[in-house]
Image: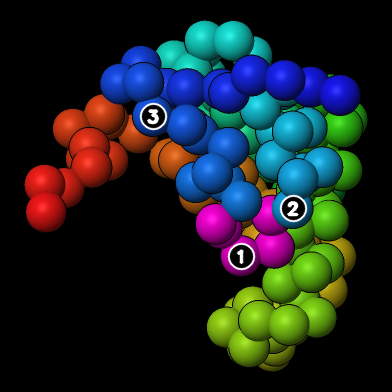
Amino acid sequence: MITGTVVDSGGYPVAGLLLGTYGVGPDTAAALLIAAGDNPERPGTRASFAALCGVSPIEASSGRTQRHRLNRGGDRQANCALHTIVLSRLRRDQRTRDYVQRRTAEGKTRREAIRCLKRYVAREIHQLITRSPSATAPMAA
């Protein structure tokens, strides 16, 4: 059992923010926090966090075909956690379903749409992990 609380540079718990995000459960939050490491500033940019989680796009074009694939490197547990979040959102969140439907109408495959969603979720998680302490300071009543 893990004890203690992961806090950001302002002393506010990060795990509570992650658990408040749609589709994020305790296991996925733990996997993403482990991937981020002890230092919340470690993944400096959204792109570096995406690469750390293995969801940064890599060009896989050939001839006239322009497409991307997911990075095979990175933390596989974090990638699995992002995949779990995306699948839970696909089951329950209408905005996510609409997004996949729009992307498939544009000619992308469902797999490519899920790749894009993973990158979007990684961006969202990175923002929560590295947010500024002044933006999340508790408001005086």
In magenta, the rendered stretch is: 20-24
Amino acid on which the number 1 mark rests in the picture: Tyr
- Quarter of the figure with the C terminus: bottom left
Q: Is residue 100 visible?
A: yes
Number of residues whose C-alpha sits closer than 10 Å to that of mark 1, classed few (under 14), some (14–19) or many (20 or more): few
Disc 2/disc 3 C-alpha distance (Å):
19 Å
Amino acid on which the number 3 mark rests in the picture: Tyr
Helix, strand or loop at disc 2?
A: loop
Number of residues whose C-alpha sits closer than 10 Å to that of mark 2, classed few (under 14), some (14–19) or many (20 or more): some
> Label 1, on which residue?
22
Q: Residue at x 26, y 29 (%)?
A: 133
Compare residues 59 and 133 and report the one nearer the observer: 133
SS majority, magenta:
loop
Helix, strand or loop at disc 1?
A: loop
> CB of mark 1 within 8 Å of CB of mark 3?
no
Compare residues 34 and 68 and report the one nearer the observer: 34
The mark that comes first in sequence, 1 or 3, is 3
The mark that comes first in sequence, 2 or 3, is 3
Q: Residue at x 50, y 34 (%)?
A: 14
With respect to residue 82, does 134 lie above or below? Answer: above
Q: Position of residue 75 (x, y in %)?
A: 81, 24
> Label 2, on which residue?
25
> Label 3, on which residue?
12
Q: Which residue is drawn at 80% across and 80% down?
A: 91
